[in-house]
Amino acid sequence: MQFSADAHFIVRITAADVGKRVSVRTLTGSGEPGARFTDTVGVLTSWTGGVLTVTRRDGRIVHLAESALVAGKVVPPRTARPRGLPATTVAELTTVAVRSWPAPDAERLGDWLARAGEGWTRRANSAVPLGDSPPDLDRLVQWYAARGLRANLQLPTGREMLTAELDRRGWTAAAHTSVQVAALAPLADRAPDERVLVSRELTEEWLRGWPRAAEAPATARRILGGGPLVLFALIPGDDGRPAAVGRCVVDGRWAGFAAMRVDPAHRRRGLATTVLAELARAALAEGASAAYLQVETDNPGARALYARLGFADHHHYHYRTAPEG
C-alpha cells in the first residue's frame, strides 16, 4: 500500500514490512486544536487489527493506530559511530559484561546463558544471549524454577521481535538500560588524587560503601570479586564509611565500570568523577584502552555525568520477567 496523506507525507510501509526497522509519523488529535505529529523509530513488530506495534531499540513498545498514520518508511539500521569512540558490537560487549559480573550458578542452554545468584541483582539472575538462536522459554522457566526464581531474560538491542513476543505472553519489562562506551585515556586525563585508594582486594571497608552487598553478603562477595582483573576504589570518609566507592573490571582492551556510589553526605563534590578517573588510570596501566558502563535510562543525573565525561550510548537492553504460575 502507498498513499499520500497530504502534499508532504507518504506511507511506504505495509504489514509485509514486519521485522524491519521503520520510521513512522502519526497525527494525534486530527482536526482538533493542539493536534500534533509524533515520530517513532524502531522495528515494526506487528500490524494487525488496525494497530501497528513498533519496538524501540531500548525495548520500549509503542502501539500506533493505523488511522493516525500519516507517513512511514523502512530505514536502515543505525551504523554511525561518533568519532573517537571504540568500535565494538553488541555481542562483544554482552560477552565482556557477563565476565565482569559472574553469577555463582550459570549454565548454557542453547545460545543463552542462564545465570543465578540467590536473586542478588538482575544482572546475575537473568539469561543473556550469546548467539543468534531464540531461547527455549520452557527450559529456561524450568531452570529458574528449580532455583526458586522466576525466569528473567536480558534483551539487548536487536531482539525486538522477541521483545514483542514476550510482551504478548505477559512477560513484564523492567530496568531499561543504556550500555555506554568511551575512550579510556581521556577519563584519566587529570591530576592524580591521593585521596582515592585503588586495590585488587575487596575489603570490608569497601563493602560498607556499597550497602546492597549486605542483602546477600556471601553471594555479593563472590560476584563483586569475580572477573578477569578486578579493581576497587574508595575514598575514606570521616565517619567509618567510605565517602565514595567504585569497581572496574579489566578484560583485554575493555575496562568496565560498575558499583559507583557516593555516600549521600558527600555528594555534589565531584567524587564520582574522581573515583572513575583513578580507576581509569589503573586500568590503563593494566593495558586497557576502551571503557564501558551500564546505566538505567531513568537515572538522568548519572547519564548527564557520564555524557560530560565522554560516554555515549552504544546499545540498550532491558529485562523481561516470566509471569507467575
Image (tube, rainbow, N blue to C red):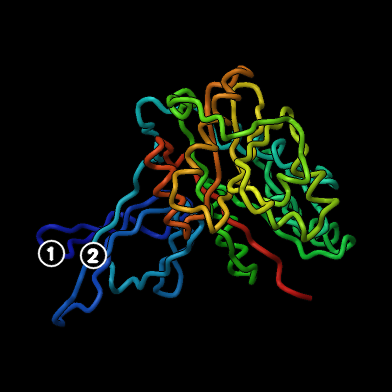
Q: CA distance from mark 2 to mark 1?
A: 8 Å
Q: Is residue 24 left or right of residue 56?
A: left
Front one among 240 and 98: 240
What type is the residue that disc 2 sits on? Val
Report helix, strand or loop for mark 1: loop
Q: Position of residue 303 (x, y in %)?
A: 43, 49
Please give the residue where the numbered disc 1 appears in the rendered image: 6
Kindly identify the residue that appears in the image at 37 percent across and 52 percent down: 22
Question: Can you see residue 88?
Answer: no
Name the mark on residue 38.
Answer: none
Packing grade of label 2 (10 A; few <14, some 14-19, many >=20) is many
Front one among 246 and 307: 246
Front one among 41 and 49: 41
Which residue is situated farthest in the bottom direction here? Answer: 32
Res 301 → quadrant: bottom left
What type is the residue that disc 1 sits on? Asp
Which residue is situated farthest in the left direction here? Answer: 7
Q: Is residue 306 left or right of residue 170?
A: left
Question: Can you see residue 167?
Answer: yes
Q: Is residue 106 above or below residue 229?
A: below
Name the mark on residue 70.
Answer: 2
Q: Is residue 175 above or below residue 49?
A: above
Report helix, strand or loop for mark 2: strand
Q: Are marks 2 and 1 in contact (CB under 8 Å)?
A: yes
Q: Position of residue 48 (x, y in %)?
A: 46, 70
Kindly identify the residue that appears in the image at 74 percent across and 50 percent down: 124
Q: Position of residue 178 (x, y in %)?
A: 50, 48
Packing grade of label 1 (10 A; few <14, some 14-19, many >=20) is few
Mark sitting earlier along the chain (2/1): 1
Quadrant containing the N terminus is: bottom left
Which residue is situated farthest in the right direction here? Answer: 146
Kindly identify the residue that appears in the image at 79 percent across and 76 percent down: 325
